[in-house]
Each structure stands twice: as C-alpha cells, then as structure tokens.
Amino acid sequence: MTAFLTIQEGCDKFCAFCVVPYTRGAEYSRPAAAILAEARRMAAQGTREVTLLGQNVNAWHGEGASGLAGLLRLLAEVPGIERLRYTTSHPRDMDEALIAAHRDIPQVMPFLHLPVQSGSDRILAAMNRGHRAEDYLRLVDRLRVARPDLALSTDIIAGHPGEREEDHAATMALIRRVGFAQAFSFKYSPRPGTPAAGAPLQVAEADKDRRLAEIQALLREQQAAFNAGMAGTICEVLWTGPGRHPGQMSGRTPWLQPVHALAPSHCVGRTTPVRILAGHPNSLSGELVEQERTAA
Ligand code: SF4
C-alpha cells in the first residue's frame, strides 16, 4: 500500500550539530534505472504510495534523470503509483525544477517536510545551514505559489550552542509566520565529534527545556488548527489497514494525516473520497461518502 524507497544516502552538508556526514559518509545517489525497477516491483505488489528516502533526498543527482524533479517525473509514469513523497529535504536543494514539480506532477503530494532548525540567522550560521531565515521564508512563499494547498512540516532544535533569548524569539516568529501542519522539535544534545558539541556557550538545560516547551506548545496549536480546518471537507484517503475499533479502517490524507472511518476491509489499498467529520490533535475522523458506502 505504502512503501519507502531509498534513493540517496549520506550527506555533504556538515551541519554543526549532526553526525550523519561522519557516520554515513559522502552523498551517494542510486541510478534512476534501479529506483524505477524497484518502484515498478512495488507497484506490481500493490504499493500505491511511495516515499523516496534519503538523508539529503533533494540533493539526489543519480544517473538517468535530471535531479529529483526529473526522477519524480519518471516515477509518476509508473502504472499504479498514485502518490509520491520524499524526505528529508534541505532548503538549499529546493531548486526551481523541484518547486515546479509540486505544481505540475499530480502524484507529488501537497505535503513537504522541510527542516529549518532555527529562525535566527545567527544560529543558522552557527549551525552551518547555509541559508538565512528570510531565504527559508521566501522558499516557502514560492512553494505555496506553485502549490497553494501545500502543507509543511519541519524540524526545530531548541537551545543550540550560542542561542540567546532573541534567537529563540526569532524561531517562534518564523514558526508563526509559516504555520506548520506538523513538526518534530528537539532539545539540542551534543553529538560527540561534531563542531557544536565542543562549542562554547552551551545553553543551560532549564533554558533549553523552557524554549522547547514554548516551541512545542505553538507547534501543537498549529497542528490542531490545521487538522480542525479539515472538518467538513471531502478528501481522498488511501486506506492502509484496520483501525483501532471494530469495523474501522485507517488511512492517510494527501497531507499525511491519519484518518479513521467505518469502512469495509476491501478498501485497503484503494483511495476513496471521505467526508471529514472532525479534526483531532493527531488524526482525523471521517465517513465514506455515499457512493462509496453503496459500492462497498
Ligand atoms: S542535518 Fe541533514 S543536511 Fe545537515 S548534516 Fe545532518 S543530514 Fe546533512
């Protein structure tokens, strides 16, 4: 039904807090032909949604396609593949062609995990992220012009070495400005051997805890509002398996929200329209629209 497909490994970015470039080595991209062969096999076995994986997935530059945008175009032609996603992306590798892919390829889902880590230029520089907060915001605007219903998710680190109250305030401001549908946020913890681990001005644990709590409260509020805003809409749900209660099935919206509804078990692997009845903090509940219930 849904499957992950690794297309890229390793990372050349060397963010100051991250061990990946040391543990996983330099960037490597699998050739398009091998990826397409695997996608065709998955589709033949019933996979309808493929999530392309890589530590730096949008830096993919394998043989046989022009960047990730080119690869997505080829994958969209594989019969049976209805949905394409990719994770994890770096803002610096979101090029024009990839932004256009969100506009032009219907199989590319309107949901993007795009880590920002901090909203402070000073901390982004200390992290060696290679972009400013403003660059990220402009990128989000361009993506939303290309795909107005795009929802974003991100990663945020609270209390990176050198982070002051004004840097934390800048992160909160960036979160407010973007409005994330989902996010992962963490308290900075030193990874041995990384530049940030040995950096001066480590932030006190109590400050990290408080900043993380503030960040998470805001992100929770945004996620709940995003989910609540779906109530009353009809959206396409790809059914993935049984839900928690008898007779209930569970699936995913294009925006990756889990949905629960009463549905026949043969729905699994199909995408059907669902009327969303309510949005909860982490999921949605809905009902099959009439013609689907009759067909069931
Ligand atoms: S955070 Fe991501 S981009 Fe940065 S070094 Fe780690 S894997 Fe690479």
Image: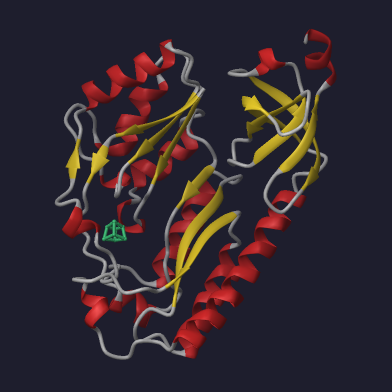
Q: Is residue 294 left or right of residue 125?
A: right
Vertical comparison of 122 with 4: above or below: below
Q: Position of residue 45 (x, y in %)?
A: 44, 12
Q: Is residue 12 something that shows in the picture?
A: no
Residue 194 location, x and y as percent? 21, 71
For image coordinates 22% across by 21% down, the residue present is 33
Quarter of the image where the C terminus is located:
top right
Residue 201 sits in which quadrant?
bottom left
Relative to 221, is 96 on the left or the right? left
Residue 184: x percent and y percent?
50, 59
Q: Residue at x 54, y 75 (%)?
A: 212
Q: Position of residue 138 (x, y in %)?
A: 45, 62
Which residue is pictured at 34% across the width and 55% down the height?
90
Instruction: Answer left or right for 27 relative to 96.
Output: left
Q: Which residue appears at 31% of the width and 44% of the height?
A: 57
Does residue 229 sit above or below 198 in this rendering?
A: above
